Image (tube, helix red, strand yellow):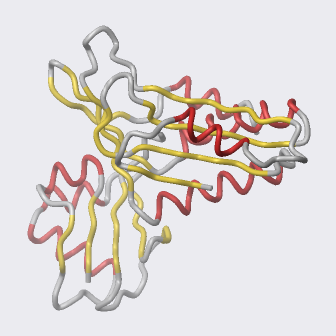
Amino acid sequence: MIWLTLQPFDPGAQLGAFCSGRTESGAVASFVGIARGDQGQATALELEAYPGFTEAEIGKIVEAAVSRFALHDALVIHRHGKIAPGEPIVMVATAAAHRREAFEACDCLMDYLKSRAPFWKKEHGPAGARWVEPSQRDLDDIARWD
Amino acid sequence: MRVLLFGRLADLAGWRERSFDPPPANLAGLRAVIAAADSALGAALAGPGVRAAVDKAIVRGDVALGADSEVAFLPPMSGG
């Protein structure tokens, strides 16, 4: 499932629901990304999505991971709009028969989301706001899966 | 025709969504209409890494447009 939301979400409740009723998936791995305050240097993060297009592009990333890692299921929740430090931005959960596939798919999905998901990101700080693009580290991380 | 701008393009233009009536017949025509009204925006739309989507699908080069088309100009994406 892919869910874009303007509202804060509860990762614990989402993970509980994702695990519930699974009798064949021996492993669920999850990751939660949280907005950093950077000691007061970041007052808010603003993510702009293109509703419809953004979900469809994330859907392609998820579909590729499901097939590559033989996942039973995958969940991606992504905030957009203004996000305060400490609030979850993104959550990924993967279900597979065994843990290795679940861990790797979760890691791979996050690397793709960090550099390929169609969002435009603005960082707000004491000195004003600026648009940001993927960092060199994000680009190096995604290259691990080529 | 609905035209959408994202990220720094919307900040530069001062608008995020605008209707174009009568609609230009193709993407090149739309770019020309936008550039005639705002040359800085026209240049930014042709800048490196800026892609166009028609009805939520990325397009390359020129394509025909209609009155119901939704055209989006997408600057380089930041990722999530």
Q: Which of B14 and A101 is in front in this view?
A: A101
Q: Residue at x 67, y 32 (%)?
A: A30
Query: Taking B65 as reference, is B15 above or below it?
Result: above
Location of residue A95 by image quarter? top right
Residue drawn 70% across the image and 48% down it: A74
Reply above or below: A115 against A53: above
Q: How many labels does the image show?
A: 0
Q: Residue at x 27, y 28 (%)?
A: A44
In this view of the protein, which residue sits in the foreground, A25 or A91? A25
In the image as oriented, which residue stretches furthest toward the top? A39
Residue A67 position within the rendered picture, expressed as x and y whole percent measured from the top left: 82, 54
Compared with residue A112, is residue A140 higher up or lower down, i.e. above or below? Answer: above
Q: Could you tell me which residue is drawn at 17 percent across and 68 percent down?
A: B35
The answer to which of A35 and A50 lies nearer the viewer is A35
* Residue B54 in which image quadrant: bottom left
**x and y percentages locating residue A1 in the rendered image:** 62, 56
Residue that lies at the very extreme toward the front in this rendered image: A21
Q: Where is residue A107 in the image (x, y as percent from the top left)?
A: 70, 31
User: In screen coordinates, is B60 left or right of A102?
Assistant: left
Q: Can you say whether B47 is above or below A79 in the image?
A: below
Q: In which quarter of the image is residue B70?
A: bottom left
Q: Is residue B44 left or right of residue A94?
A: left
Where, quadrant-wise, is the N terminus of chain B in this rendering?
bottom left
In the rendered image, residue A59, in percent from the top left (x then y), is placed at 62, 58
**Residue B80 relative to residue A71: left or right:** left
